[in-house]
Amino acid sequence: MENRRKLLLKLLNIYCYLTDEAGSDEIYLIVNNQKIWPVDRTFHQIRPGRTTILVELKEYDPGTPLDIEVWDYDYLSRNDLLGIFPILLDEPGGPYLTDMRQNRMETRKARYSIEWELDYL
Ligand SMILES: [Ca+2]
């Protein structure tokens, strides 16, 4: 059984097509209850366009489903979960583009995609 090789997930870019708030969102990403981006501050201010993120996540087994949560930081209220990028870690390849699935409790506006690729470790 040569199915033991672990996968390396590379998150490359976030594309914002429409922000939830006027002008820009204060975005950070969470995977499995851990903040993975940005690493050096609380959030990244995102306006429509491409934002390069370059995050590597390691040691996934092939066939792993992963939800990358997109959060918006708020100064005066609770932070909002805008949605998730649902991705399946299967075989090395990419780059792939995955649309954010909106959390309709918080937004019917925000439109984001993430670009990612998979390699063997
Ligand atoms: Ca905000």
Image: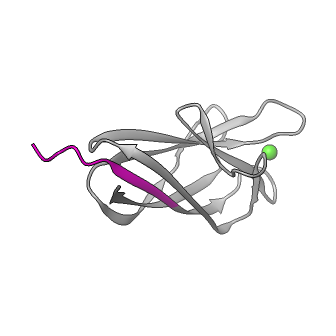
Q: Quadrant of the N terminus?
A: top left
Q: Is residue 51 above or below residue 102?
A: below
The residue located at (28%, 49%) in the rendering is 90
Q: What stretch of residues is rendered in magenta?
A: 1-11
* Side of 83 relative to 121 (left or right): right
Looking at the image, which residue sits at the far left? Answer: 1
Q: Give the tally of numbered discs.
A: 0
Location of ligand 1 given as a quarter of the image: top right
Could you tell me residue 75's position as x and y percent?
88, 39
Q: Is residue 10 magenta?
A: yes
Q: Quadrant of the C terminus?
A: bottom left
Q: Is residue 39 magenta?
A: no
Could you tell me residue 4's position as x and y percent?
22, 43
Q: Is residue 37 above or below residue 79?
A: below
The residue located at (70%, 55%) in the rendering is 19
The residue located at (75%, 55%) in the rendering is 44
Pick the residue in front: 70 or 91: 91
Looking at the image, which residue sits at the far right? Answer: 76
* Side of 5 relative to 107 (left or right): left
Q: Is residue 30 above or below residue 51?
A: above
